[in-house]
C-alpha cells in the first residue's frame, strides 16, 4: 500500500510546535542552517486509533528519516524513509513496520520543515484512506551532546513489541561491538543478536547501527538477517538508548534502558 505525505501550512505548524532547533544551531538559540537533521519528539493524531496518544521519537540524519511510536509496554510501529529532497521540502519513499517487525506499506511522502522552528506532516494511506498528522519538536540538547562509543558500553534492555513480554537485551562493548550473549527473551524463540554501533559524526549524538539477528530458529520477532539504522542516547546520564533498524522487509525499534 502506498502512503502519500503532505505538509500542513507553516502557520499551522507554528501554532502546534515551537522551539524547533536543528543541527548547526548557534549557542544563542538561533539557527544558521537549512537542514532538517535532528532528534525529535512529538505525536501522531487522527487515522488509525493505534496512532493516537503514543509518544513519537524521530530522527532525521542526512538522507534517512526514522520514526517510532512508543507505548508504555513497547514499540507499536516504525516508519523508515529514504529522503531524496531536503531543501525546504522533504520527499522520498519508505515503509511502515508493525510492532512485530513486519513491513506494512510502501509509502511515498511530501513534507517541509522550517529550520529552527517547526515541522508538521500530514499522511494519507491511499488504499485504506487512512489519514493523520505527525507533529514534531526538536530536542537540540540531545542532538548536540556528541557521540562516544564508550557511552554505549554496558548492558541495555527494553520491551520491543507492544503488548508482549519480549525483552531485547544488548551487551555492548566500549568499542561499540554487540556481544554474542545479546538476545531477547519472552517470546520462546531464544533470539540472538550481534553486530555493532559506529560513529558517524563525533559532534552529534547519532550512531550507525548494524544489528544481526540469528532468527531464533524462525520464531524470533526479529527474523534472521542484518538490519541497519540509527541510534542515540537520552537522559542526563545517557541511560536511555533509542535504536531503530530495518532491512527493507522487516524493521525493529526499541527504547532500551541501561541496567
Image (spheres, rainbow, N blue to C red):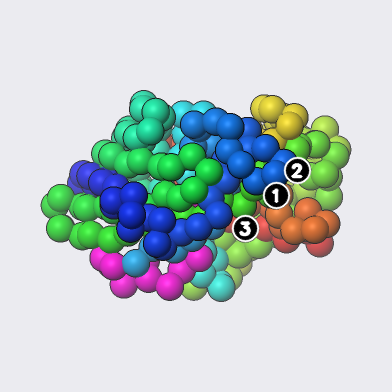
Bin the neighbour count of mark 1 within 10 Å (Cα to Cα): few under 14, some 14-19, many 20 and up. Answer: few
Measured as percent of width and height from the top left, residue 109 is found at 28, 41
Q: Residue 32: which numbered mark, if any?
A: none
Residue bearing mark 2: 145
Q: Nearer the viewer, residue 14 or 176?
A: 14
Q: Residue at x 50, y 32 (%)?
A: 35
Asked whether 211 falls inside the magenta stretch, the response is no
**Secondary structure under badge 3?**
strand
Measured as percent of width and height from the top left, residue 206 is found at 66, 38
Asked whether 52 falls inside the magenta stretch, the response is yes
Instruction: Give the CA distance from mark 1 to mark 2.
Output: 6 Å
Query: Is there CB contact under 8 Å for labels 1 and 2?
Result: yes
Decide if residue 18 is in sight here. yes
Circle 2 or circle 3, nearest the eye = 2
**Secondary structure under badge 1?**
helix
Query: Is there CB contact under 8 Å for labels 2 and 3?
Result: no
Residue bearing mark 1: 141
Instruction: Give the CA distance from mark 3 to mark 1.
Output: 19 Å
Bin the neighbour count of mark 3 within 10 Å (Cα to Cα): few under 14, some 14-19, many 20 and up. Answer: many
Amino acid at each position: 500500500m502506498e502512503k502519500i505525505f503532505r505538509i500542513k501550512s507553516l502557520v499551522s505548524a507554528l501554532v502546534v510546535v515551537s522551539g524547533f532547533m536543528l543541527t548547526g544551531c548557534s549557542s544563542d538559540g538561533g539557527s544558521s542552517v537549512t537542514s532538517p537533521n535532528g532528534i525529535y519528539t512529538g505525536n501522531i493524531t487522527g487515522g488509525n486509533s493505534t496512532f493516537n496518544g503514543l509518544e513519537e521519537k524521530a530522527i532525521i540524519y542526512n538522507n534517512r528519516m526514522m520514526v517510532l511510536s512508543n507505548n508504555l509496554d513497547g514499540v507499536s510501529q516504525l516508519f523508515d524513509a529514504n529522503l531524496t529532497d531536503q531543501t525546504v521540502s522533504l520527499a522520498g519513499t519508505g515503509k511502515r513496520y508493525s510492532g512485530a517487525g513486519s513491513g506494512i506499506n510502501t509509502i511515498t511522502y511530501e513534507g517541509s520543515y522550517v529550520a529552527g522552528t517547526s515541522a508538521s506532516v500530514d499522511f494519507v494511506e491511499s488504499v485504506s484512506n487512512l489519514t493523520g498528522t505527525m507533529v514534531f519538536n526538536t530536542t537540540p540538547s540531545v542532538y548536540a551532546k556528541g557521540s562516544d562509543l564508550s557511552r554505549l558500553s554496558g548492558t541495555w534492555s527494553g520491551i520491543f513489541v507492544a503488548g508482549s513480554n519480549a525483552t531485547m537485551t544488548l551487551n555492548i562493548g566500549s568499542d561499540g561491538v554487540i556481544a554474542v550473549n545479546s538476545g531477547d527473551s519472552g517470546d520462546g524463540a531464544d533470539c540472538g543478536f550481534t553486530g555493532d554501533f559506529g560513529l558517524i559524526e563525533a559532534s552529534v549524538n547519532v550512531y550507525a547501527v548494524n544489528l544481526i539477528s540469528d532468527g531464533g530458529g524462525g520464531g524470533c520477532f526479529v527474523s534472521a538477517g542484518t538490519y541497519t539504522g540509527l541510534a542515540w542516547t537520552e537522559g542526563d546520564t545517557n541511560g536511555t538508548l533509542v535504536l531503530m533498524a530495518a532491512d527493507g522487509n522487516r524493521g525493529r525499534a526499541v527504547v532500551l534502558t541501561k541496567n
